[in-house]
Amino acid sequence: MNTKKIRQLKTLTINGKNHNLEAHKDMPLLWAIRDIIGLTGTKYGCGVSQCGACSILIDGEAVRSCSLPVSYGVGKQITTIEGKTDTLDYLREAWEEINVPQCGYCQSGQLIAATSLLNSNPNPTDQDIDDAMSGNICRCGTYPRIRKAIHKAVKLKNK
Amino acid sequence: MEDIQNISRRSFVKVFGLASGGLIIGCQFTSEKESIKIDDGTTFAPNLFVQLKKDGKLILLCARSEMGQGIRTSLTSAIADEMDADWEYVRVEQATGDEKFGNQNTDGSRSVRTILEPMRKLGATTRAILIAAAAKKWQASPSDCTVEMHYVINKNNNKKLFFGDLVEEAMQIEIPEDVQLKDKKDFKYIGKTLKSIDIKEFTHGTATYGLDARLPNMKFAVIARCPSTFGTVKSFDQSDAIKVAGVEAIFEVERVKRPFGMLGGVAVVANNTWAAIQGRNNLEVTWNTGENGKYNSENYTQKLTNRVHTRAKVVPPTKGNVNTAFSKADKIVEATYQLPHLAHAPMETPNALAWVHDGKCEVWAPVQSPQSAREEAAAYLGIDIKDVTINVTFLGGGFGRKSKPDFVVEAVALSKKMKTPVQVVWTREDDIQHGYYHATNAQYLKASLDKNGEVTGWLHRTAFPSINSTFMPGANYAAGWEIGQGMNNNPFEIANTRYENAKAEPFVRIGWLRSVCSIFHSFGINSFIDELASTAEKDPLQFKLNLIGKDRIREEKSPHPLNTTRLKNVMNIAAKKANWGRKLPEGHGLGIAFYYSFFSYVATVVEVSVLHDKVKIHAIWTALDCGLVLNRDNVINQMEGAAVFGMSIALHGKITAKDGAIEQSNFHDYTMTRMHEVPPIDITIVENDEAATGVGEPGVPPIAPAIVNAIFNATGKRYRTLPLSDHGIV
């Protein structure tokens, strides 16, 4: 059990900026980012790594911030949806062009997952996209547009 | 928006000047006599929809909640279109919950259907005022002026005046009583595609949903609720929970016995969400599980099934005599269909931030019905609704769940107690286990066929706990409006029909979920007529078109009576797009289903394969007739999403209760359609001059039956219960 005694001061590097925070070492990164640091673009969806709404990039790779303790993020480069990378920007452009979102809530996680995919696979097939993106739930059902937008982002990037 | 029809044009539109230099056009939704007030000359009274600034910025108010249906873009684009405004200048502001805006309930696929015209009228009036202002400036006749993209143009000399430069003159103009709405051919935005006005917010994580609302010194809370509906706290031990770092208070909250009242339980308040959750995990609560603690939903669905197998309460209209038709039949077909409870599971769980202080209450929450939230908050606090402000955030999905603001009452109660702002967060487990559930349902259908394969008699019995039971304890039969969602008003031409409704008492809170009773009635009817077509040895498409019968407009009390021509048209379009009748690969099948709901016409064809006992959906073709199309790509997006939502119902969706407790808890056991399951989805929108009707819900009902019909076509196997995952084929 965690008690009031075991609070620790930590530094997280998010979107290139250092944030000092006092948090229990087991607190998931999600809640540290949202409730303590105050970056609310990263979303809570399930708390158990089932939906991907909380996805963030750690050293360029998408992880589920709801299931990783804050201690895991110390000393690493964290990118959230508020951040900026070239790939993320191409994806944003594609998302906007194809008018992907409906309610928009899951799209932070979708964009982060897509960034991670393109970071490791610059020219994915539909199958690659399905494999990489099936961990992210969109209750509104924007999947066909997400698929299209990822291909579009590849085109924008290669232009 | 019935009340609007009684309002004269003179009182419908109002115009004001702003001390800060702007022009406001408002409309009066509620009372002819009530005047619009501006508090200090720089602040809007909240019933104003259009504000034009001197720099040309056009601020349009949206009084319906944005939950992914695109309403902030579509309704405001109608104003902008009639104004001939440049969309680049448009900003959208969200209205707070207030009766002055008329009905703000964002449900029933009704926003565009009911307030498109008032919005257009606001735009047209503003345009007329701006023309009059320019004409006055030029000393020209208004008839010599026109508007193009934020400029009034003098047709005689091609002089132009920018909207923003007309603000002061416009304030002096008397409001025209009669304004002409545009001709369809002149539409600039209506019927075209506009991207969501909020798209950049969505792609940068800056849109504020309820869960993102923040106030200084706010606390975060979760509530432990009884596993069975309306159970109460017997006792609780907080000794471990209070030790959790960040937990600040733990106390019991009582149930509020109102339809949207809170369930009650034990609240854990902390300085961050995770601490509150950890606190709750360490809380020991003993419950009085109460009457609903005996609920076993699978037994219950079976009980409903038994009830539809015997004569039940007759629901009008009865036509001819089904028994006579059955006795003369060449063939009789009977079938029973069962569907489970469903949960809404919007990606953003229910939540609300409330701040109760100094006799007032302010709330930030993702609500589909801000006025209900306001009433509930005021009722709980015993204060006037004028002292309650409901700020409507973005909704991370709604699907009907966020029409029921029990979560707002919780936040209000906790803020009152804590004397600080408190955000109540529902975890996913809370959302799945303590919702307002879509009703489980059993249906029995029986029909007679004559020698030609024509349907001569039709008996349809349905049983499901009513949404009315949430509002009126003891309502153990379906409401007329629930039956009327396609059951006793199917579009068929059959000489002998009887409709019956069996008793169904509730054991959980029953609530509306996207498409509501159309989900199960469409499944029953569309599955059954496919069975009839098979027995009659006819092509399903031709058989169903024939069953709908001749072209006619049904006589009924409705602003948009059923037009069978439009229904058959969408079926023919979907079938054509799917190349119905073509030779299919081994193991493949095509299925068709259609439904008229929320006054819109939808037909869907699905292609599936069943290989190695696993179903795969290869393609979906949907055709929609919703009359006038407002934002084309948005409508397509809604239809695509409806297909995915319908797939979740067909393949995965099932909520069960055992000993009163919901057995599912999160996305691992209440599963959703995921990307790898989704095929190409082709949407066709019919072009016509009919009035605009809804698009948020009508796309859902045909999907599940089209899938099971396609499986039947592929395999000869008929699935009469959902989800298909129960049958081991997903």
Image: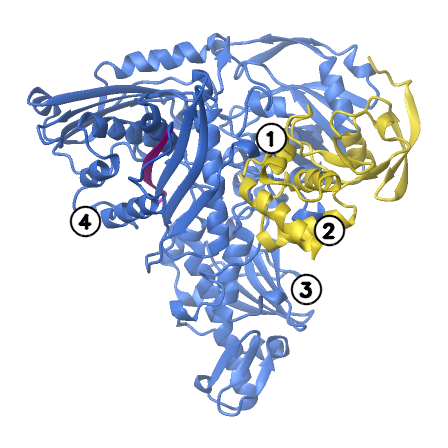
Tell me the residue that label 1 is attached to. B407
Locate residue B228, reporting x and y percent: 54, 14
Dot 4 or dot 1: first in sequence order is: 1
Rendered position, A107 above or below B609: below
Residues at circles 2 and 4 in contact by the CB criterion of under 8 Å: no
The region drawn magenta spans B588-598
Locate residue B272, reporting x and y percent: 78, 29
Quarter that holds the N terminus of chain A: top right
| Cα–Cα gap, marks 2 and 1 | 36 Å
Do the residues indicated by labels 3 and 2 lie within the same chain of the protein?
no
- The letter of the yellow chain is A
Tell me the residue that label 4 is attached to. B551
Identify the main secondary structure in magenta.
Answer: strand
Residue type, mark 1 in image: Phe
Q: Nearer the viewer, mark 3 or mark 1?
A: 1
Residue B691 found in image quarter: bottom left
